[in-house]
Amino acid sequence: MSKVEVVVLCQDGRMRVLVVEDETGLAETLKAGLTAEGYAVDLAFDGADGLWLASRYRYAAVVLDIMLPGLNGYQVCQRLRATDNDTPILVLTSKDGEYDQIEALDTGADDFLVKPFSYQVLLARLRALVRRGGSSSPSVLRLDDLSLDLGTRRCRRGEVDIPLTPKETAILAYLLERAGEVVSKADLVANLWDFAAEVDPNLVEVHISALRGKIDAPFGRRTIKTIRGAGYQLTGQR
């Protein structure tokens, strides 16, 4: 592979986005913005690398430029769909003709944005795609009366809305995906932080403590349990 940035991938990919964009500055800007929203982001800078990553790993969505070196975005879409890969794809294009938009949709894209675009619009479109998800991907994670909508990032305990930070949302989503399993600090760091970041394990404890203070303490619950020497376990027990 050529110029590609890959982080260790989470097992299900619900909080991970692939950005395939050959304009390095734009790719890095999108990564910074999406990371701030709680996503873990992989970057690829040409069609071949993007196709390889999207085929090998699971993502919440792919943000795909059309004008790429090597394989263009249309070809990437077409080849992914030919293998029954149903990952939601948001196409970015500098062309604004209706036939270009039709070609993007006909080759398998779920939505498109014409450059230059508003980042807030991209974020809203991306949330909508994540909410719909692939054909086998539920958009709402639940454990008893605790729920997390992956599209809107809305967390609720029963009928009570619980505001979470982007990182708290990402951690809760990962724990919900692996409810009942023991998840180590190292696992959380590897899957929810940039691979190049030097994350102090104590930072994980800080986020877990804050999360408990929001989803458990006010409701008299102990959903997130500490397993000494091993990590954390999400259970439905009171």
Image (tube, helix red, strand yellow):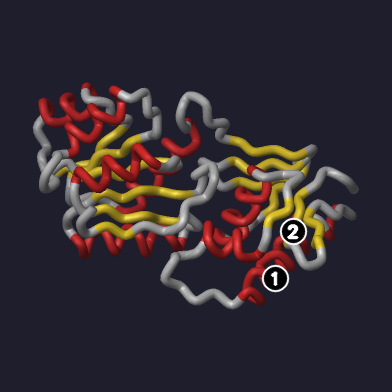
Marking on residue 205: 1
Viewer-proximal residue among 10 and 119: 10
Earlier-in-chain disc, 1 versus 2: 1
Viewer-proximal residue among 197 and 29: 197
Measured from the top left, where is residue 65 in percent x and y?
A: 20, 45
- Identify the residue at image location x=81%, y=57%: 225
Report the side of 35 relative to 105 (left or right).
Answer: right
- Compared with 4, 176 (above or below) is above
- Identify the residue at image location x=51%, y=41%: 151
Measured from the top left, where is residue 148 in percent x and y?
A: 64, 43
Q: Nearer the viewer, mark 1 or mark 2?
A: 2
- Compared with 114, 191 (above or below) is below
Report the side of 102 relative to 181 (left or right).
Answer: left
Label 1 crowd bin: few (<14), some (14–19), many (20+), radius 10 Å: some
Q: Which residue is mark 2?
A: 232
- Identify the residue at image location x=42%, y=59%: 7
Q: Amino acid at mark 2?
A: Tyr
Q: Amino acid at mark 1?
A: Glu
- Compared with 177, 107 (above or below) is above
